[in-house]
Image (spheres, helix red, strand yellow):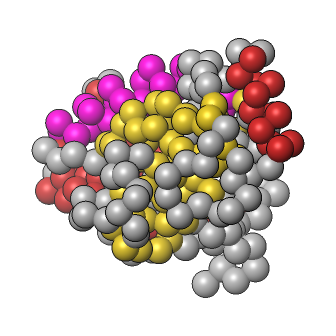
C-alpha cells in the first residue's frame, strides 16, 4: 500500500502547478493520469493576456497574478531543465470600428487598464489585417506557455520518481472512511481532482453546471510582415513558434461537436 498525503487526479496545467507547490511545501503526493494526447492543456495555445478585450478591463486579479506567474514558471523550468515560458511579449490588438476606438480611448484616459495599455495608434498596423481596421493598441506583459513541453517533461519526472500512475481513474473504485481515501493500492489523506473537462462526468461533481467547449489550433506559415516578437489578436490569437515565419493560430470554440 502506497501512503501519501494527497492523491491528485489529472496532470494538466492545474495539476502540474499544484504538484509543484506541494513539492515546494514538502508535502507528499501521487498523481493518477491516463496521459491523453488531446487534453486541453496539451492542445491549448497557452496565451495569457492581462486585458479583457471585450470590456476593455483588467483580467481578474491580474496585478497579483503577474507578480507570481513568471517566477513560478521559471522555478519549474529550472526544475525540468527546459524553457517553456515566453513572457513579456506585447500583444497587438487591431481596432476595427469607430465605436471600438472610442471604447479603448475611454479605458486609457480613465486609467482603467494601466500599466498594460497606455496609448493607442489611429493608423493601420503593419500586417495582413482586415481593411476596416482604424487603429491598434499594444498590450504589455502578455505571453504564452508551451504547456505541451512542460507537461511531457513533468510526466517523465514523476514517472521516474514513481509518483505518476498512468491509467484512467475509476471513480467507483474509490473507498472513503473518516480519515483516509483508498484507491487500489494508494491510501491518501485527501483526493484532489484536476481533471479539467472530465469533471463533467465526475459523479462527485455532477451538480456543477458546466458546459464544455472544444478548441482547435492551427500551425500556419505566415507573411514576414508579422514579428516573431509579438502576439497578435484579431478574432483569434496568433503567436510565434521557434520556426521562422511559423505561428500558431486559434483557438476556435465549438459547443456542439466535442469529439
* Nearer to us in this view, 133 or 209: 133
On the rendered structure, is 36 left or right of 91?
left
Q: Quadrant of residue 37?
A: bottom left
- x, y percentage for residue 138? 55, 36
Write the start and end of the magenta stretch as one range.
Answer: 58-79
- x, y percentage for residue 127? 50, 58
- x, y percentage for residue 168? 45, 72
Q: Residue at x 46, y 30 (%)?
A: 141
Q: Residue furthest front?
A: 123
Q: Quadrant of residue 226?
A: bottom left
Q: Residue at x 40, y 38 (%)?
A: 89
* Nearer to us in this view, 72 or 224: 224
Provide the major secondary structure of the magenta segment: helix
Q: Residue 61, relative to residue 2: is it above or below?
A: above
Q: Is residue 66 magenta?
A: yes
Is any atom of residue 41 visible in this view?
Answer: no
Is any atom of residue 97 visible in this view?
Answer: yes
Amino acid at each position: 500500500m502506497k501512503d501519501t498525503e494527497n492523491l491528485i487526479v489529472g496532470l494538466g496545467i492545474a495539476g502540474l502547478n499544484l504538484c509543484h507547490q506541494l513539492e515546494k511545501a514538502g508535502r507528499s503526493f501521487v498523481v493518477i493520469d491516463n496521459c491523453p494526447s488531446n487534453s486541453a492543456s496539451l492542445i491549448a495555445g497557452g496565451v495569457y493576456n492581462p486585458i479583457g478585450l471585450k470590456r476593455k478591463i483588467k483580467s481578474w486579479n491580474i496585478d497579483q497574478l503577474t507578480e507570481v506567474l513568471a517566477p513560478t514558471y521559471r522555478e519549474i523550468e529550472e526544475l525540468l531543465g527546459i524553457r517553456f515560458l515566453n513572457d513579456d511579449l506585447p500583444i497587438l490588438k487591431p481596432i476595427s470600428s469607430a465605436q471600438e476606438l472610442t471604447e479603448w480611448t475611454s479605458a486609457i484616459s480613465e486609467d482603467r487598464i494601466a500599466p498594460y495599455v497606455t496609448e493607442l495608434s489611429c493608423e493601420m498596423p503593419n500586417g495582413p489585417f482586415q481593411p476596416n481596421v482604424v487603429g491598434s493598441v499594444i498590450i504589455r506583459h502578455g505571453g504564452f506557455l508551451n504547456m505541451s513541453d512542460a507537461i511531457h517533461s513533468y510526466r517523465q519526472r514523476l514517472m521516474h520518481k514513481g509518483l505518476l500512475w498512468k491509467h484512467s481513474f475509476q471513480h467507483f473504485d474509490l473507498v472513503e472512511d473518516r480519515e483516509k481515501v483508498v484507491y487500489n493500492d494508494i491510501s491518501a489523506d485527501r483526493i484532489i481532482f484536476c481533471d479539467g473537462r472530465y469533471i463533467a462526468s465526475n459523479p462527485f461533481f455532477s451538480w456543477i453546471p458546466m458546459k464544455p467547449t472544444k478548441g482547435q489550433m492551427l500551425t500556419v506559415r505566415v507573411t514576414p510582415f508579422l514579428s516573431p516578437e509579438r502576439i497578435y489578436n484579431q478574432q483569434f490569437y496568433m503567436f510565434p513558434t521557434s520556426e521562422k515565419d511559423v505561428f500558431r493560430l486559434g483557438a476556435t470554440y465549438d459547443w456542439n461537436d466535442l469529439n
